[in-house]
Image: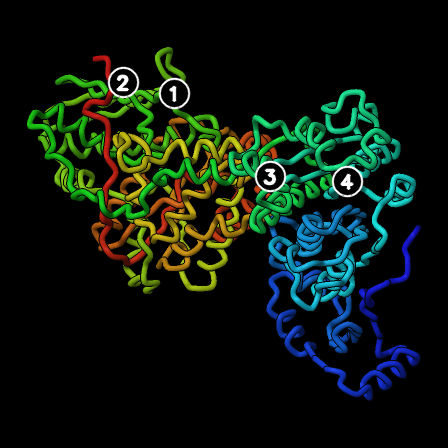
Amino acid sequence: MNEQAPQTADYRPRLLDPRDPTDRATLRQLADTPGIQTVDLRAGLRAELDQLTGPPPGLDPGEERWVHYPWRNALVAVLGPDAFAAIRSDRNRNKLTRDEQRRLRELRVGVVGQSVGHSVAYTLALEGTCGLLRLADFDTIELSNLNRVPGGLFDVGVNKAVVTARRIAELDPYLPVEIWQTGVLTETADEFLDGLSLVVEECDSLDIKFAVREAARRRRIPLLMDTNDRGLFDVERYDLEPGREPFHGLLGATTGAQLAGLDTRSKAPHVLRILDPAQLSARMAASLAEVGETITTWPQLGGEVQLGAAIVSAAVRRIGLGVKLSSGRTRIDLEAALDSLAEPGYLDDEADDHATELDDEPPPADTIGAILACAQRAPSGGNVQPWILRGDDELIEIALDPTDTTAMDVDLRGSAVAVGAALYNATAAAAAHGLLSDTQLLVDEPSAPLVARLRLRPGTDAELAADYPLACARHTNRRLGNAADLPDSVLPALARAAGEQAIVHAITGRERLAEAADLLGASDRVRYLTPQLHQQLYAELRWPGEDIRTGIDVRTLDPAPDELAKLQVGSRSDVMARLREWSAGTALGEFTVDRVRSSSALVAVGFRKRGGGAPDLADYARAGAAVEKVWLRAQLLGLAVQPVSPVFLYANRPEDLRRVSPEFTDTLASIQRRFLDIMEISEDENVALVLRLSYAAAASVRSRRLPVPGSRNDG
């Protein structure tokens, strides 16, 4: 190493450990120095440390250092290096995770030239993007440099590398900084690059630019350069392409020796070959013609220099983290970007602006049309309406249509539940129109996996007919509840409504509901983070202006403004990929967690398995009818009802869980086991649907349906 003694002033802070006897003696001596300024930041830093979310383990808040800044004649008390780094880099997360920051601290970066290079080096230190900086510049700060070098009047006459090093030391006294006050010469370029991970070249001398590139190529070190006019940025990956020509080969056969000692006029052709005159901004190109005539040298603006530092820092992060960064050239042109301003195109967050009346059109006047319309009003997962409806005066048929099935709808079990609910609605509608029905469930028919048939005959059933208006008015209410206790009579009434063949399990009480809420939230997290489930989730949603006759109209979610914003962000698969990579995303389940915690009860409706045999789709359809009866009874009792079924609901075997989410099979198995335990669901029982019951304000919007008898109707 060729680090010379500072010629202008000290630039290294002195770190003093009060536990060390020698350092304690030095501290006492410094404290007695006339005019010394003492700043104690320890209490404030400990308070900040206490406020960190998820601090790294093993931090010792009692570890301290005193930092002596000779050029400031000041002593500053801070926490030890680990706690200091945790606090100072905390707001990087998770643009940079802690693991990524640790990897970046392994980088050793050299910066040649400390005009533009000052901002580059400081930005790297600011972000914690390296573990060592080596700075080179032979020149001193002049007042005319302060249009782009963020120094001050006290720095005029001080070596530029010293100024940068001091400023970095006042930001992070623990970051090692080396300086070369004689700059880099052709004969010292290799030595400067010794041990570096990469080099940023920002000097003015063409021959030194060339020498640094040749040395980088010999040592297989990547080189970056920002030329701030129109955000010009170059990457030369000599680590990946050791045979690559300097400056992308733009100088042809020119050698470094030929570039040495050239005057401004002689340099111009080479500079223009590098910069490409056709790509210069009009102001820069015109200014070059005025150098030495009406202006002193080529112009640079502080803002453009700062932009260049940001570009370099982004490239350093990519190299340090192994993200793809090829050799080549690009421009980040702010002026062009500002010329292309446009109105934002994202969705208006005022979902209520488009709210419509809760009521649908009145049912058809004809009997068969009314029966089919009521069947169509049945609930289904994602409101996909997985059926084909047909009807005449003698027969109503509801055939399961698997076209829009999803991964959560394991073996069409959820679709069968929907068919069963539609079947119950049809029988209630028939009874209200003076018709009784003999129902039949056929599995694995040639035409469909499940077919429900109602053979109509004259007759009356007042109890069944009473459910017809309830079925027509049934809807989902996702508003927050008030967590009020249910009257003792409610749950027994719901169990009676389900019928003797169904099973109903319910939980109440703040503690048990909170536990179930957390598990359902964890299930939602898996739904967001599993690519297939995430895609299918957002395929269900309908935004204002879209066809809302199928799917979930986002207005029916009754979201708060912040929830709607989160829903929009959550649509991005790249965001979900990052959260999955970080094993994060707990907040993805907040919508469900908040609603279940505000509920009065959670109810699971299902059926007992037949002796020894696996349940078929007819079993799920019969349970679907029970679900609909419970839902109607709950609404009649003044309760808001919302299905909150977890993603594993229809997964009866371990292989089913793997089909639902290969990435989170073990996680789902754990959540499923705990959820079934909380709900007290035994091994011989299957769940058709889980309903959240609450006392809440009325829903503002009701989901729509396809035209009767359904857009798929062919009869």
Tag 4–tag 3 contact (CB < 8 Å): no
Label 2 or label 4, whichever comes before in sequence order: 4
Residue shown at the point (24%, 17%) measured from the top left: 713
Instruction: Categorize mark 4 by other alpha carbons within 10 Å: few (<14), some (14-19), many (20+).
Output: some
Residue type highlighted by circle 1? Thr
Can residue 222 be seen in the rendering of this structure? Answer: no
Q: Which mark is residue 144?
A: none
Tag 2: residue type? Arg
| Residue that carries the numbered disc 4 in the rendered image | 205
Q: Nearer the viewer, residue 485 or 529?
A: 529
Expressed as whole percent of the image width and height from the top left, the position of residue 139 reads: 78, 54
The residue tagged 1 is 403
Q: How many marks?
A: 4
Instruction: Name the image quarter holding residue 339.
Output: top left
Residue 80 percent location from the top left of the image: 77, 69
Q: Residues within 10 Å of mark 3 (few under 14, many from 20)?
A: some
The mark that comes first in sequence, 1 or 4, is 4
Determine which residue is flagged by label 2.
Answer: 712
Q: Is residue 574 above or below residue 697?
A: above
Mark identifier at residue 664: 3
Q: Mark 4 falls on what kind of element?
A: loop
